[in-house]
Image (tube, rainbow, N blue to C red):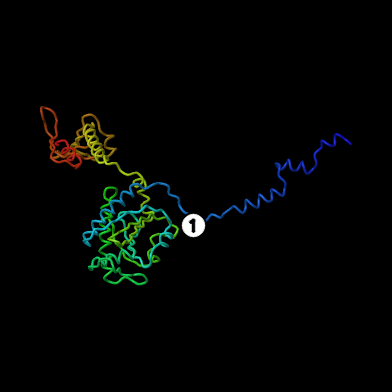
């Protein structure tokens, strides 16, 4: 028996060490398993992740619930309870899938933002409003499932939509000035088309309206692309002292601008000439000019005053007749205060 041969490695053992301790069979199994874990990525169907909490939008929804409650009370003369649900960020097809049939869908513009939003009234909310307006007490709610809304129901829906638009504008007033403009009303979600794709992200909020033992729902659906320009404003609610700070900043800026030093130039006349004529001039030549009745005073090339020139205390002076810059009048009023 050769002791040296016992210390030599076989070819299989050498291949195993070169492959990192795994055999070819194990590598094949690992490779096939890794390929099975790979999932295709389609940019058109992937959900956009929005992690920011829209605190200002939560404040707007709470204010809208209070304003909408007062409008419903003035219409029905019954004390309703309006509750704002949580803000949901989801694809548009998920929102559309959970709507009842038929649902009153109102398309609106949120001017000056670009795009179309959706105010959806559930059939239970419509039947509850009709029953209360015509003297019912809620014992016999009208069923609207499986049929279109009647002309009477549509008139009541338009009144509720008008109240909701006014309440929504009032709720946004302290954050951003909006004007809700009604476009049209639909009963089928396929005719709304407020997004370019069913997978586009929308921001939805459900408001529960309770009168007595009956309850209806109202949904506000806004495509995220509409409010994305206001994302910073919606995630960071404005402080109550911001108005005071802006006024103080404007006052300090006005004082500093008034103390700024400027160079004023009173232009007596402009004499058009040619360079060849200037080259021929010599000492003693006279340049004739017309005596103007009024002269203009310039600052950095911009006209500021218009007036008459003369002498004051043996010095050349200009008597101001007219101010060209309206902002100077504003500074003068602020100084008088």
Q: Position of residue 310 (x, y in %)?
A: 11, 33
* Count of labels in the image: 1
The residue lying at 29 percent from left, 56 percent from top is: 82
Give the vertical position of 33 relative to 182 (above or below). above
Where is the C terminus found, in terms of image quarters?
top left
Quadrant in the picture for residue 145: bottom left
Indicate left or right for 170 with 54 as reference: left
Q: Position of residue 182 (x, y in %)?
A: 29, 61
Indicate left or right for 258 with 50 as reference: left
Depth check, front residue: 301 or 9? 9
Q: Position of residue 142 (x, y in %)?
A: 30, 69
Q: Residue furthest top?
A: 314
Give the vertical position of 90 relative to 246 (above or below). below
The residue lying at 24 percent from left, 35 percent from top is: 253
Quadrant in the picture for residue 216: bottom left
The residue lying at 12 percent from left, 40 percent from top is: 321
Give the vertical position of 209 relative to 13 (above or below). below
Q: Position of residue 327 (x, y in %)?
A: 20, 41
Depth check, front residue: 212 or 260? 212
Quadrant in the picture for residue 21: top right
Q: Secondary structure at mark 1?
A: loop
Indicate left or right for 140 with 47 as reference: left
The residue lying at 22 percent from left, 68 percent from top is: 135
- Residue under circle 1? 45
Where is the N terminus found, in terms of image quarters?
top right
Q: Residue furthest right?
A: 1
Q: Residues within 10 Å of mark 1 (few under 14, many from 20)?
A: few
């Amino acid at each position: 028996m050769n002791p040296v041969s016992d210390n030599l490695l076989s070819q299989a053992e050498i291949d195993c060490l070169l492959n990192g301790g795994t055999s070819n069979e194990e590598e094949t199994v690992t490779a096939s398993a890794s390929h099975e874990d790979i999932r295709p990525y389609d940019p058109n169907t992937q959900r956009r992740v929005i992690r920011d909490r829209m605190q200002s939008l939560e404040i707007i929804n709470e204010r809208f619930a209070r304003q909408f409650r007062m409008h419903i009370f003035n219409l029905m003369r019954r004390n309703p309870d309006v509750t704002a649900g949580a803000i949901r960020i989801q694809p548009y097809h998920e929102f559309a899938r959970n709507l009842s049939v038929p649902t009153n869908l109102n398309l609106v513009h949120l001017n000056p933002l670009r795009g179309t939003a959706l105010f959806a009234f559930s059939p239970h909310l419509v039947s509850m409003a009709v029953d209360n307006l015509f003297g019912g007490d809620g014992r016999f709610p009208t069923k609207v499932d499986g049929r279109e809304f009647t002309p009477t129901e549509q008139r009541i829906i338009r009144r509720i939509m008008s109240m909701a638009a006014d309440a929504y504008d009032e709720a946004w007033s302290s954050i951003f000035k909006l004007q809700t403009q009604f476009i049209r009303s639909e009963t089928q979600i396929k005719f709304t088309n407020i997004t370019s794709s069913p997978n586009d992200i929308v921001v939805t909020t459900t408001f529960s309206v309770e009168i007595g033992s009956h309850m209806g729902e109202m949904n506000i659906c806004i495509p995220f692309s509409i409010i994305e320009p206001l994302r910073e404003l919606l995630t960071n609610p404005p402080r109550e002292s911001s108005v005071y700070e802006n006024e103080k900043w404007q006052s300090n800026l006005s004082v500093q601008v008034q103390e700024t030093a400027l160079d004023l130039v009173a232009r007596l006349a402009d004499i058009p000439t040619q360079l060849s004529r200037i080259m021929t001039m010599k000492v003693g030549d006279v340049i004739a000019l017309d005596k103007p009745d009024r002269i203009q005073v310039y600052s950095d090339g911009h006209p500021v005053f218009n007036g008459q020139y003369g002498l004051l205390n043996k010095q050349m002076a200009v008597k101001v007749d007219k101010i060209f810059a309206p902002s100077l009048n504003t500074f003068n009023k602020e100084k008088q205060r």
